[in-house]
Image (cartoon, helix red, strand yellow):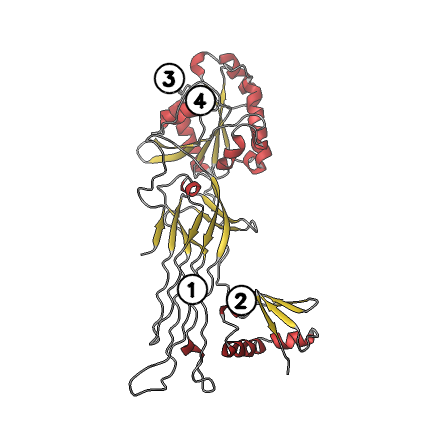
Amino acid sequence: MPLVWPLSGQCLGLKRGDRVFVDHVYIKVEGGNGGNGIVSFRREKYVPLGGPDGGDGGDGGSVIFEVDEGLNTLLDFKYQRQYQAQRGANGLGSNQVGKNGEDLIVRVPPGTIIKDRDTGDILGDLINHKEKLVVAKGGQGGRGNTRFANPKRKGPRFSEAGQKGEERELELELKLLADVGLVGFPNVGKSTLIASVSKARPKIANYPFTTLVPNLGVVKVGNYQSFVMADIPGLIEGASEGIGLGHAFLRHIERTRLIVHLVDASGTDGRDPVEDVAVIRAELNKFNPELAKKPEILVATKMDLGCEANLTRLKDAYGDILAISAVTKEGVSELCEVIIQTLQALPKKERAQQRVEITPEFKETDDFTIEKTDTGFILNGKSLDWVSRFDIRNFEALQYIETRLEYLGVMEALKNQGAKDGDIIQIGELEFEFIFG
């Protein structure tokens, strides 16, 4: 069984009813190291000079992200920032292979984007339930001395260490998955609307930034139709530049197919409804010009407070606009019908999957580079990573390294670069004094 995080019943020190939303974190992941191969020889009663029987080490486990549709926040990653899979077991005598390390399954909410923090590359965009992505591959197990036996080397007294597991610094970003995103200034009625049409229960009060987290609700229309609505908090003038809460949550609008733009037609907070619409549209465009291209339904709210004059001004400025009161539910059913009809008319957007195939570090076909120094040469390249897996104090292992470097063309390349007897050759953290024949 692979290991799974988060563990059920994990104590986070939260009281019942607490709602914590985390949508951006940095973590470190490490694949398990491969187990070491061992040096061993048969020791049987009537076979005093038995051959080698050292087994290979087991492969290290990998760190794997898996989508869990029951999660909707990256909160758990605030309490644990480092994840390491199990290492492989060392080989044993009698050609016994070490046990492979367990994979570590890390659960993430749908809509999680995984980036390599060092390069900025997107490793995966995980959306579907149970979808998986290997983010740190375990190291290969080292070979026991049996694997190095040949007609000329019948009793090798060296083995190979396990390969180190992959290590990565990751950036996780959550973008909520919703069909409809509610936008507008604070206190225009977004929370009241989502509470009236779904089972979402956001905190509702009449002061700025009541909503501190995005709220998701499933809205059912008729017997068979439904859509997911997200209440995006914190949009004010300057939100795209990080003012208020907008910059933290604007990213959640990017995945929505339709924007429902609410404007307080009553003007009770002393703002001009006509100007409010222009400000919010400008903020969306500044944050991401693609947002300005999304289909939008403009909705005038709080019509129960008597806003006919402002409604007329809004229609004159922006054309079609729906009028509702989430408190009295006037016009709410009609709004839901319009949303369903608009969604049905929109093409279903195929998500682009940007993914990097993560492969083991050891790959003999990779190129290597040679850098001249005052004392010799420095060699770099994944095709040489295996060198560090041998004990260079072991003469037989050193002979094996030299033979293999010759096979890979490294020796010839060094000669072409002007290497001479006594030059110091550095590969990784190891240094050799090479003598060329």
Q: Which residue is painted at 43% across and 85% down in the image?
A: 154
Left or right of 55 on screen, residue 236: right
Q: Which residue is painted at 47% across and 37% down in the image?
A: 256
Residue on which disc 4 sits: 189
Q: Quadrant of the N terminus?
A: bottom left
- Disc 4 marks a residue whose amino acid type is Gly
Q: Earlier in the sequence, mark 2 or mark 3?
A: 3
Give the structural element (helix, strand or loop) at label 2: helix
**Residue mark closest to the camera, 4 vs 3:** 4
Name the residue nearer the viewer: 133 or 150: 150
Rendered location of residue 41, percent (x, y): 37, 80
Q: Earlier in the sequence, mark 2 or mark 1?
A: 1
* Mark seen at residue 328: 3
Label 1 close to label 3 by CB (< 8 Å): no
**Residue mark closest to the camera, 2 vs 4:** 2
Question: Where, by quadrant of the figure, is residue 243 drawn?
Answer: top right
How far apart are the two marked residues, 2 and 3, measured between alpha carbons? 69 Å
- Disc 3 marks a residue whose amino acid type is Thr
* Mark seen at residue 385: 2
Let me know if residue 44 appears in the view. yes
How far apart are the two marked residues, 2 and 4, measured between alpha carbons? 60 Å
Q: Earlier in the sequence, mark 1 or mark 3?
A: 1
Count residues near mark 2 (Cα–Cα under 10 Å), then give few for <14, some for 14-19, many for 20+. some
